[in-house]
Image (spheres, helix red, strand yellow):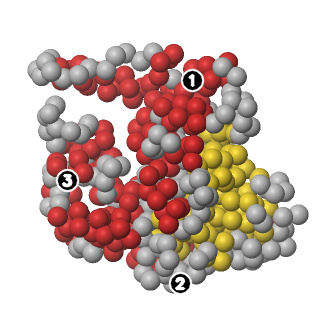
Amino acid sequence: MEFFTLEALPAQHGDCLLLHYGTPEKPGLVVIDGGPSKTWRTSLEPRLKAVRAARGGGFKIDLLMVSHIDDDHIVGVVDFTGAWLTARSDGEPWPYPVAQLWHNSFERISDSDLTQVTASVMASTGGTGNVESLDFDEEDRIDAKEAQAACKVLASVAKGARLRNDAKALNIPTNIGFDGLVRPGGATVPYPLGPELKLHIAGPLSAQLDALRTQFARQLPVGEATLAAYLDESVPNLSSIVAVASYRGKRILLTGDARGDYLLDGLAAEGLLDADGRIHVDVLKLQHHGSVRNTEDDFYRRVTADHYVVSADGRFGNPDRETFELLIEARDKADDYVIHLTYPVASIDSARKKEWEEGRLRKAEKAKTKPKTKVPVPWDDATFSIAALLEAKTAEGYKFRVTEPAAGKGPKIDLLDALPY
């Protein structure tokens, strides 16, 4: 038996992935991201406990990788290292040792001073770190919900620094073989991790990191204009580690929250696209939880897969219905592929509808004093729900399939033998 399995744990609106590889005699494990708050206790810790029990003695995590510092990716990892430090302080053995960590902490990328960054974020939001305390006018080119997400990215700088310090205290080797940052060309290409498993790094690109440094320095101290710049067309996701994991001829594209055009640039620079500028992988983890803001029009024509993983629960509107539309229409009707969700589609749509209606009511209230405010139309399932789109596309003759997980479990995609635990 031999395994190459991607497992997407329920991580609310975030990412928490397990990559299993190897044989029963020599199993390997990579953990990619830890999701937001509560993911460690509700998903990651129970699953690691079960895997360790099934595998027996000698358990370790071969690589713990944090794609970037957004709170919906890093908080669960910080909870993990925090629990480890507590166990060590209490004199208790830690059951989940880590052989190495990949983590690009934001303040190192930007050459900025952490104290200054944190102080700016807190000062600009009245000491709360909550962008709702700011007064956004209608003419501002930013929605309050998006601004809040951007603010959280900035506030996550402290989480990145804490993880770096935790790793140092725990003696976890970090970014071994790289020149400080995990990025293309920074180590052996592709990076060998255990027997047969190789990781080809396709992001972040040097040009993006240079732009990140310049923009970050220019926009301190942080204010409303800076928050507007910290959306997907700009800073936070430039630092996402993008990797193609290959094992026994199978390939998995791990995207973090990288933008589609940057993904293509990185894959092209690493020679991973064919003569037509395309790549086919066995598994594609959709970037940024299926947000349409991270995908250009032809991305899904140029990057195709047999399996697509969408890690999202509907919060912040993710995944977008438009993303599924782009994906499905990019493939031929007869193509056989599977879309794997980490939550049932009805649950995702319910969360998306709730946020849509809450946003509509906020806009309607604002329109009472600012008549030019654009108020969204009421939610309509046929127009906005993902379930309705999937049903319509199936009726049109598209052959894709959708898997929905059982309660408390995420999808497992076995590319070789089925993982028995």
Task: For the C terminus, give its image quadrant.
Answer: bottom right
Quarter location, residue 335: top right
Cα gap from disc 2 to disc 3, whole angstroms: 34 Å
Would residue 321 appear left or right of 122 to someone viewing this image?
A: right
**Which residue is tagged 2?**
177
Q: Please report the residue visible at 49 percent of the width from the left and 56 percent of the height from the top.
A: 264
**Which residue is tagged 3?**
226
On screen, residue 261 above or below 364: below
On screen, residue 294 above or below 184: above
Dot 1 alpha-carbon crowd within 10 angstroms: few under 14, some 14 to 19, many 20 or more: some
| Residue 259 coordinates in the image, percent (x, y) | 43, 52
SS for tag 1?
helix
Q: Please report the residue visible at 70 percent of the width from the left and 46 percent of the height from the top.
A: 306
Cα gap from disc 1 to disc 3, whole angstroms: 36 Å
Number of labelled discs? 3
**Which residue is tagged 1?**
389
Task: For the N terminus, give its image quadrant.
Answer: bottom right
Task: Give the camera-side residue of 102 and 203.
Answer: 203
